[in-house]
Image (cartoon, rainbow, N blue to C red):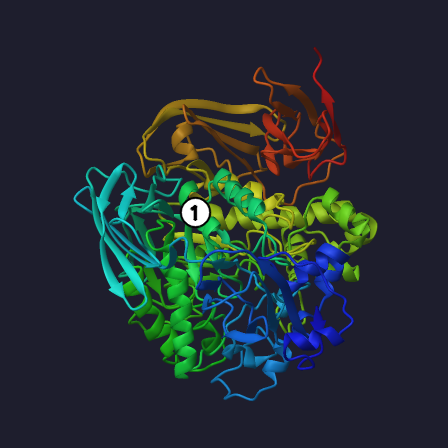
């Protein structure tokens, strides 16, 4: 129930309030309760910070007292009543809270009041040294809460209010864990684990700690009203945890036997992580192997209710399928739950975690610093031993914000002292970073510089520089990059907005387009700029006459930017050791930053990034007067031996060259060729020398091995190609012997950005080029209830659309 701020101060006063009451799910939020009753639109429109919220329930049951009432997260300020007694207050969304209830009848009413955050913000507090450009309410720097729904950049996302994490009531019949700390290390092939777990109400024989097949008897130390269980284990010939792109993400189950009770402590892994920063860059090494980090900035899969367990798992599985190996949880969102971290460890996904400090000047006030210390410990201690956590950062743009406002680099106690100290003593196997972005330690570079340290690079993107800027920017590690307003599929637009004509101008459409606070432009303007400069077409004119082509050109422009930027950075000699795209998934329906839409379905650049990110990949790019460069990259833990095939087609569609040669690429290595070296002669295939008319139209390179086929197609002459009546596209669907469905796509002429629009099925690949006479077999998987694969295949340079037809039997 919502009440006016301060109008009801204890549960008894609720009897005078008529309602309405919403049925709430816990864990959950006020907006999630509104969604369950009134729908998603009402939930997104709710001004949850403007009122007080009351969550009330009756708890019944027996069991011997005293009872421990535990809250894993209350957003954001909260007061808790048991019956008529105020038993607990909380001031942080991110710090768990608990209280002992000495006596409890058979049933008790629990009530939680979440005061209006807007009312809390009216309290005057000291100003910061700078104003955050992300929000208007500068007092939020004092409040330990999320900026979801509180920063304009998040559009229609409601502010989270409520018991967003689990609530538990324990009796003394079973032991209760209130703390867990695990430190893992690797020494000469042996895994070493030290464990300390605080247990309340433990009884019985000496505890036994189990790690995989190992078991040791633990020691017990009395600590106040609890006992601390300690153990030391060694695992000979330990199997290491790797990011999935570089090896097998091995984990070991950890548990404690406390008499008849077995307490699961989750999975732990053994690995080493270090960061090389001496040359001004930021290069992560796992188990002594340099890792090129690629992925995206994580966003909550359910920004309304902060739930979505199945969606979280499915999204992380997509990350793995796409060859991405890192996600970054930014300092503007929320810390994810234990299930997220378990999935990342199991799937081999590295996590870069920001502290939730955003762009604010964090106060030096001691109570604030104490609360922040408790927050970081509450995040790190339950995660200790989880191998997925590799980087912990002091915040998101915490150092960049004062630099952009022209201030000299300030010393921030929270960022430069408190957080590194907590990370050092709690998670010694994690790489600490002052903030993202940040310059190299000890130098005179600024946090705004992109050529050193950790960068947020939007030269290609928000700052509308040409794709060639990536070569001169010299980015060493991009913890954020490539923010574009990316349209979802035509089917998703029609389902949500009613018509493709809404794209680009309708208020509902524009409300979901990201924009910086106070900017006179949005990220759809950025996308239109690249349509104009890359394809030579005026997007506003096309939108008026042909919304479908307007959207296709916009998607293709983003694909071009992704291909030029990510393809260059993946090169072993680019100097860049990581690229995390902003963002992984949209927070609401529309053209957001996400590589996935708000339902988790891939958008166009997802497929481009996937082809460039797989452990074994082939990259093609023009290298000026040196012609076309070929890179074969092998991140896997085994040698790839196969065949490299190079085909060059002329503008008439004839195959001018078709060369194959055996190729071996060692584990965690790469090889490089020039096209002319492979062909054995000078060709000027890219027409960089301008000798007469351009003679070649495309180059196709495939690397075939037991690992599969990695393929890349380069269309010569740039992205601006003539729109033809037809290129001879065909699309035939068939069922394989294993029962899976595939679509065989073929073309007569060179086909630019071939994309599959299917009903009830999703393609494994799309938005690819085909050379003249080229073909590709695309696996598809069912996403709906239809039994037959239907739809169309389109190419950007063809007016004719190919229907998907059934293969003749």
Residue at the extreme top: 809
User: Foreground: 330 or 44?
Assistant: 44
Given residues 529 and 367, the one toward you in this image is: 367
Residue 504 in view here? no
**What residue appears at the point 66 percent right and 26 percent down from the top-left corner?**
747
Q: Residue at x 46, y 56 (%)?
A: 328
10 Å neighbourhood of mark 1: few (<14), some, or many (≥20)?
A: many
Does residue 643 appear to the left or right of 72 in the view shown?
left
Q: Residue furthest left?
A: 188
Q: Is residue 702 left or right of residue 540?
A: left
Q: Position of residue 598 (x, y in %)?
A: 64, 51
Horizontal placement of 402 versus 159: left or right? Answer: left
Quarter of the figure that contains the C terminus: top right
Residue in the foreground of this view, choosing between 251 and 742: 251
Looking at the image, residue 789 lies above or below residue 276: above
Residue 341, visible in the rendered structure: yes
On the image, numbered disc 1 is attached to which residue?
A: 342
- The location of residue 673, given as percent across then percent down, is 38, 36
Q: Quadrant of the N terminus?
A: bottom right
The quarter of the displayed image where residue 460 is located? bottom right
Q: Position of residue 771 (x, y in %)?
A: 59, 30
User: Is residue 776 positioned above or below 718 on the image?
Assistant: above
Q: Position of residue 428 (x, y in %)?
A: 28, 59
Front residue (pair 746, 706): 706
Rendered position, 133 above or below 452: below
């Amino acid at each position: 129930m919502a009440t006016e701020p301060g109008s009801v101060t204890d549960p008894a006063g609720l009897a005078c309030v008529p309602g309405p009451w919403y049925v709430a799910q816990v864990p959950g939020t006020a907006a999630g309760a509104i969604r369950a009753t009134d729908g998603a639109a009402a939930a997104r429109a709710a001004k949850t910070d403007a009122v007080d919220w009351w969550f009330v329930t009756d708890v019944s049951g027996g069991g011997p007292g005293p009872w421990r009432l535990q809250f894993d997260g209350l957003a954001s300020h909260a007061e808790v009543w048991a019956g008529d007694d105020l038993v607990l207050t909380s001031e942080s969304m991110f710090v768990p809270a608990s209280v002992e209830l000495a006596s409890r009848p058979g049933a008790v009413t629990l009530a939680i009041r979440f005061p209006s955050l807007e009312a809390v913000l009216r309290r005057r507090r000291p100003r910061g040294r700078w104003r955050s450009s992300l929000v208007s309410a500068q007092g939020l720097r004092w409040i330990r809460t999320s900026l979801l729904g509180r920063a304009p950049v998040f559009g229609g996302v409601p502010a989270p209010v409520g018991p967003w994490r689990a609530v538990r009531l324990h009796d003394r019949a079973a032991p209760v864990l209130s703390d867990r700390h695990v430190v893992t290390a690797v020494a000469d092939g042996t895994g070493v684990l030290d464990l300390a777990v605080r247990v309340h109400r433990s009884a019985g024989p000496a505890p036994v700690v189990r790690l995989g097949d190992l078991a040791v008897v633990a020691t017990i130390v009395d600590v106040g009203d609890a006992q601390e269980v300690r153990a030391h284990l060694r695992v000979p010939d330990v199997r290491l945890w790797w990011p999935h792109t570089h090896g097998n993400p091995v984990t070991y189950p950890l548990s404690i036997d406390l008499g008849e009770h077995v307490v699961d402590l989750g999975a732990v892994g053994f690995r080493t992580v270090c960061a090389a920063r001496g040359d001004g860059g930021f290069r992560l090494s796992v188990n002594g192997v340099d890792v090129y980090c690629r992925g995206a900035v994580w966003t909550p899969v359910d920004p309304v209710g902060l739930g979505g367990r199945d969606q979280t798992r499915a999204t992380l599985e997509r990350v793995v399928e796409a060859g991405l190996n890192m996600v970054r949880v930014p300092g503007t969102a929320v810390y994810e739950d234990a299930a997220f971290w378990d999935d990342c460890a199991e799937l081999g996904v590295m996590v870069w975690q920001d502290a939730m400090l955003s762009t604010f000047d964090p106060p030096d006030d001691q109570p604030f610093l104490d609360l922040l210390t408790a927050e970081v410990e509450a995040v790190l201690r339950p995660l200790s031993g989880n191998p997925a956590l590799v980087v912990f950062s002091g915040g998101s743009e915490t150092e960049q914000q004062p630099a952009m406002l022209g201030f000299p680099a300030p010393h921030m106690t929270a960022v430069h002292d408190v957080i590194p100290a907590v990370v050092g003593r709690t998670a010694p196997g994690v790489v600490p970073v002052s903030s993202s972005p940040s310059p190299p330690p000890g130098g005179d570079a600024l946090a705004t510089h992109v050529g050193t340290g950790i960068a947020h690079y939007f030269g290609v993107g928000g700052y509308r520089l040409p794709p060639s800027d990536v070569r001169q920017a010299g980015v060493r590690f991009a913890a954020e990059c490539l923010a574009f307003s990316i349209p979802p599929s035509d089917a998703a637009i029609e389902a949500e907005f009613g018509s493709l004509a809404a794209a680009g101008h309708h208020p509902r459409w524009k409300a979901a387009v990201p924009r910086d606070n106070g900017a006179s432009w949005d990220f759809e303007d950025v996308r239109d700029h690249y349509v104009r400069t890359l394809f030579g077409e005026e997007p506003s004119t096309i939108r008026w006459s042909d919304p479908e082509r307007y959207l296709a050109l916009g998607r293709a422009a983003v694909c071009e930017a992704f291909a030029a930027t990510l393809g260059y950075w993946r090169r072993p000699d680019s100097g860049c050791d990581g690229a995390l795209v902003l963002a992984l998934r949209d927070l609401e329906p529309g053209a957001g930053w996400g590589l996935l839409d708000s339902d988790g379905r891939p958008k166009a650049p997802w497929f481009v990034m996937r082809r460039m990110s797989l452990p074994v990949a082939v990259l093609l790019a023009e290298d000026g007067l040196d012609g076309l460069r070929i890179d074969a990259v092998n991140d896997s833990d085994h040698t790839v031996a196969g065949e490299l095939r190079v085909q060059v087609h002329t503008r008439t569609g004839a195959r001018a060259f078709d060369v194959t040669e055996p190729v071996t690429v060692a584990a965690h290595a790469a090889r490089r060729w020039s096209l002319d070296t492979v062909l054995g002669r000078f060709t000027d295939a890219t027409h960089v020398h301008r000798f007469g008319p351009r003679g070649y139209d495309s180059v196709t390179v495939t690397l075939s091995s037991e690992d599969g086929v990695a393929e890349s197609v380069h269309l010569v002459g740039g992205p601006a190609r003539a729109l033809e009546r037809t290129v001879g596209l065909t699309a035939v669907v068939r069922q394989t012997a294993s029962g899976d469905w595939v679509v065989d796509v073929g073309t007569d002429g060179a086909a630019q950005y071939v994309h599959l629009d299917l009903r009830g099925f999703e393609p494994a690949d799309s938005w690819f080029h085909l050379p003249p006479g080229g073909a590709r077999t695309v696996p598809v998987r069912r996403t709906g209830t239809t039994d037959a694969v239907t739809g169309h295949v389109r190419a950007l340079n063809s007016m004719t659309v190919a229907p998907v037809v059934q293969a003749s039997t």
